[in-house]
Amino acid sequence: VQLQAFGGGLVQAGGSLRLSCVASGRAFRSYTVAWFRQAPGKEREFVAANTWSGSTYYADSMKGRFTIARDSTKNTAYLQMNNLKPEDTAIYYCAAQSLSGSYSNPTYGYWGQGTLVTVSS
């Protein structure tokens, strides 16, 4: 499975962006898909996950602002981000196939290249 993330950019605080993660390979639909982010000088942190059964999970600071979704017909996962804040500035990575059994643990089998989101105040 190969993942390609795109959709990042520069946005003002309060604005929205939608990130996309396009996957190759049929196995994508059977994997948990997640988004992580990494800000400069910080560790990679969990953002959201979507399991193969459709369950969704979010980090507390993203609840109510971010929405993860998946279109299996297009082998694509999305992260809709609303009401963005300057502290959301980071490189966002999509990942597939949780290896730890814990969706928030950044131990995934496949990673995209990351897409930069910059939120100005």
Image (cartoon, rainbow, N blue to C red):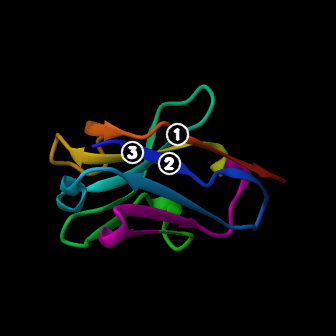
Q: Residues within 10 Å of mark 1 (few under 14, many from 20)?
A: many
Specify the amino acid type for callout 2.
Answer: Ala
- On screen, residue 52 above or below 43: below
Specify the amino acid type for callout 3.
Answer: Leu
Q: Residues within 10 Å of mark 2 (few under 14, many from 20)?
A: many
Q: Name which residue lies at 25% across and 51% down.
A: 25
Query: From this viewpoint, which residue is outermost toward the top?
Result: 41
Residue 37 pos. (x, y %): 51, 43
Q: Which residue is mark 3?
A: 3
- On screen, residue 59 above or below 104: below
Q: Which residue is mark 2?
A: 5
Is disc 1 in contact with disc 2, using a CB cutoff of under 8 Å? yes
Q: Is residue 71 magenta?
A: yes
Give the camera-side residue of 57 and 54.
54
**Foreground tag (1 vs 3):** 3
Q: Name which residue lies at 50% across and 48% down.
A: 5
Marks 1 and 3, the one that precedes in the sequence: 3
Q: Which residue is mark 1?
A: 114
The magenta stretch spans which residues?
68-87
Is disc 2 in contact with disc 3, using a CB cutoff of under 8 Å? yes
How far is the residue under mark 2 from the one under mark 3?
Answer: 7 Å
- Quarter occupied by the N terminus: top left
Specify the amino acid type for callout 1.
Answer: Gly
